Amino acid sequence: MVQVQAGDEVALGLLLDRYARLVLGIGCRILRDPGEAQELVQDVFLHAYRKAALFDPHKGAFRSWLIRIACHRALDRREYLNLHRFYDDRNLDDYVDVFRASTNPELEADLSLCEKILRKAFEELTHKQRLTVEMYFFEGYTLREISERLNESLANTRHYYYRALEHLKKSVHLNSLKKSHDAI
């Protein structure tokens, strides 16, 4: 990044090669649209290039600085897209893989079993945990947005979220161990 600060565009290309997948992953996770996530990569690196003078290697790693920029820009973009109702009309092309998967009986049986396990584990969650997970994964809210909607502190919302994930993970893991033990 010090080379980029000196105006070296080749160094920017190296940073892009190294960190583009990281930024793309953040974009996919927050924006939930591959095209928007690719746009985010370009936007983040252009912003990093323009604001290179703001980076101070003594305050932290470039990766952390870049992640912070990517998250802020992605959240801003998602808010913009929400306001313009981008997520309201989902295209059927987004679900083609789901339709194809339903034609494979073995995969369908595995998915059905996984669904039963997850449904049971989901029912075991507390009301606040279940609500937090639903809002996060199915409605696309951030933990901060969820805390505001539930009138809870951000710390409590994080607690509900992480405890719920821990419970779901344990349930799936225990059932997969049981399944592999039964197969032996």
Image: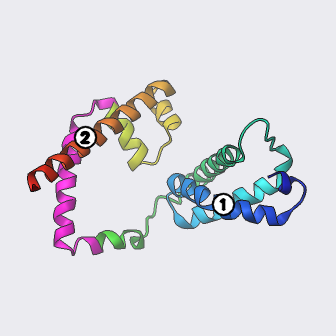
Q: Which residues are magenta?
A: 100-128
**Where residue 183 sits in the image (x, y, percent)?**
10, 56
Q: Is there a contact, CB below 8 Å, between mark 2 and mark 1?
A: no
Q: Secondary structure at mark 1?
A: helix
Q: Which mark is residue 122?
A: 2
- Which amino acid, mark 1? Arg
* In the foreground, 51 or 179: 179
Q: How many marks?
A: 2
**Where residue 124 sits in the image (x, y, percent)?**
22, 34
Q: Decide which of tag 2 and tag 1 comes sooner along the chain.
A: 1
Q: What residue is at 34 percent from the left and 30 percent from the top?
A: 128
Please name the residue that numbered disc 1 is placed on.
Answer: 18
Q: What residue is at 23 percent from the left and 71 percent from the top?
A: 102
Q: Residues under labels 2 and 1: Cα distance?
A: 38 Å
Query: For the stretch drawn in magenta, what is the main secondary structure?
Result: helix
Q: What residue is at 84 percent from the left and 51 percent from the top?
A: 2
User: Does the segment drawn in magenta span residue 104?
Assistant: yes
* In the foreground, 23 or 31: 23
